[in-house]
Image (spheres, rainbow, N blue to C red):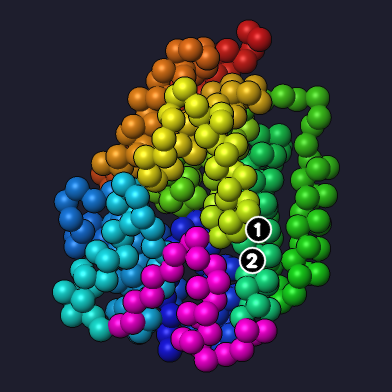
Amino acid sequence: MKVAFPHMGRVCIPLKTLFDSLGVSVIIPPRNNDTIKNTGYKYSPEYSCLPFKMILGNILYSLENGADTVIMLGGSGPCRFGYFAYMLNLIARDLGYRFKFICLEPSSLLKNIVEFKRLLRCGYSDIYTALVLGWEKLKTVDSLEALYFKTLPYISDKDSSKQEFEEVVAKLEQSSNILSINEIYRDYSDHLAVQRDIYKQFPRIGIVGDIYTLNEPYSNHNIEYLLGMKGIETTRSVYTSTWVETNAFFWKRKRFNKKMKDLSMGYLNDNIGGFAMETVYHTLDFINRDFDGILHMVPITCMPEIVSRQVLQRISVEKKIPIMSITVDEHNDCTGFETRVEAFAEMLYMRHKKV
């Protein structure tokens, strides 16, 4: 068996660890690039969103390079993500590929574990050990990214910091036990703490929107790094680990949903699918935490984010906070994107100095 799964940020690190621990071969496509995007664009429906096109490009690359099993998350609700698995499977088979397609429901953790046991023919203890190690790596790589982008504006040698960060992530990828994972995070955290000037305070931007666009740097033009290099502190609203935590564990999901609905009430009273309500909730949460501005990433034709964009316009007026929505698709020009983001950052700098 050779398993494939699409890229989304650095999720390949914990997933590869999971399958390696279970003795399963993994076919990993290269980090998202123009070739992957163009392949997905070529075979996707015209009005499908950018995440769908990128995921299709990943899957087709893996199948072309020997994968015989594709694992993909499923979903439900008005967001078209609920149709991703069906459409991806259909398109790949129409192109002549023959493979096993496994669709996992994020809210059915026990069901997924049973499916893995049946598929891989291994014991529950083996699956548990692999899941724990993969889960620790997922949480740690997300924590490392959050820490790096939060500290980047304060680092004097920003250019070399990127290489340092990638080396730390590479060490994490090679780690084989939880003790070494914790040690990697602790050492890097101490390293960044020394570089941070506690007397400086840069403008802070909260980044909200669709989970794929937020977590996949190719899709968002590496926006957190771009802003960090411009002296803006960024905080991402949703990480893969936080999303898994609030979806796979029902007690946390129930608690988070109540908190989200309570804060969003009056702006978006019902969950309309996708990450619309999360976008509204995190925007209001960032405002309550005195962030200087909000950046909203919207994949083109994404209905939930289009709805939330209208809500955010009202919030911007009522709360008197700058909110900029940026639509992303496969035709986005990197230069034009950077120009808009830089203009928004400069405006926040001027407001920040006045305060």
Between the residue at mark 2 and the residue at mark 1, the CA separation in whole angstroms equals 6 Å
**Vertical position of residue 264 compared to residue 212: above or below:** above
| Residue at horizontal 60 percent and vertical 58 percent from the top | 249
Does the rendering let one see residue 171? yes
Q: Position of residue 82 (x, y in %)?
A: 33, 57
Amino acid carrying label 2: it is Trp
Does the rendering let one see residue 34? no
Residue extending furthest toward the bottom: 121
Q: Residue 39 or 257: which is nearer the viewer?
A: 257
Amino acid carrying label 1: it is Lys
Give the magenta range. Answer: 99-126
The image quadrant where one finds the C terminus is: top right
**Vertical position of residue 299 compared to residue 36: above or below:** above
| Residue at horizontal 36 percent and vertical 55 percent from the top | 76
Q: Position of residue 127 (x, y in %)?
A: 61, 81
- The circle drawn on residue 139 is 1
Instruction: Find out whether the residues at labels 2 and 1 contact each other: C-beta distance under 8 Å.
Output: yes
Q: Residue 158 or 213: which is nearer the viewer?
A: 213
Residue, disc 2 = 135
- When asked about the image quadrant of residue 196, the answer is top right
Q: Residue 24 or 233: which is nearer the viewer?
A: 24
**Vertical position of residue 205 compared to residue 38: above or below:** above
Label 1 environment density (alpha carbons within 10 Å; few <14, some 14–19, many ≥20)? some
